[in-house]
Amino acid sequence: MALLRILLVPLLMGLLLAGCSFHSPLVAESDETMDNWLLGRRYQAECRYELARQHLALALASARTDTVVEQLKQELAAVDLQIKTLR
């Protein structure tokens, strides 16, 4: 009985967890997106906000996944706010 419990509990837990997991296809971002994103962040850190905005906009234009699109939109909005505060 104890052996059955030792074997059955992990098996059932594995089946339950596998049934609840979300499987989404992985889509890699393009090199262009990542390069422009990194450049945008670098320029933002250097207080070169206009260049940062240009590269973040380029990264957004070539983004493939919804999560990256949303993140880039947020970062673009932050850079826009930084530009407006300097004017």
Image (spheres, rainbow, N blue to C red):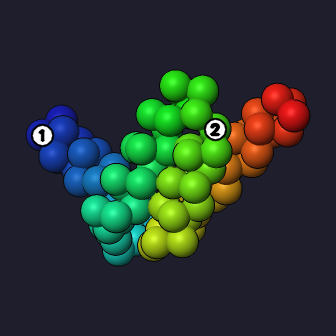
Q: Residue at 16% of width from left, 46% of height from top?
A: 7
**What SS does tag 1 mark?**
helix
Question: In this rendering, would 81 be left or right of 60?
Answer: right
Nearer the observer, 27 or 77: 77
Instruction: Read off the residue under disc 1.
Output: 3
> In the displayed image of the protein, which residue is found farthest to the front?
87
Mark toward the start of the polypeptide (2 vs 1): 1
Report the disc number at residue 18.
none
Nearer the observer, 71 or 82: 82
Disc 2 marks which amino acid? Tyr
Name the spot of residue 30 as percent of width and height, x first. Answer: 32, 67
Q: Quadrant of the C terminus?
A: top right
Disc 1 marks which amino acid? Leu
Nearer the observer, 5 or 48: 48
Q: Residue at 53% of width from left, 26% of height from top?
A: 45
Neighbour tally class for label 1: few under 14, some 14-19, many 20 plus, Cα within 10 Å? few
Name the spot of residue 51 as percent of width and height, x first. Answer: 56, 46
Give the CA distance from mark 2 to mark 1.
Answer: 65 Å
> How many circles with numbers are drawn on the protein?
2
Name the spot of residue 19 as percent of width and height, x first. Answer: 40, 66
Report the disc number at residue 49.
2
Depth-wise, is mark 2 or mark 1 nearer the camera?
2
Name the spot of residue 15 as percent of width and height, x first. Answer: 32, 61
Which quarter of the picture shows residue 21? bottom left
Whether residue 31 is visible here, answered yes or no, is yes
Question: In this rendering, would 83 be left or right of 42?
Answer: right
Asked if residue 21 is positioned above or below residue 9 in the image, the reply reads below
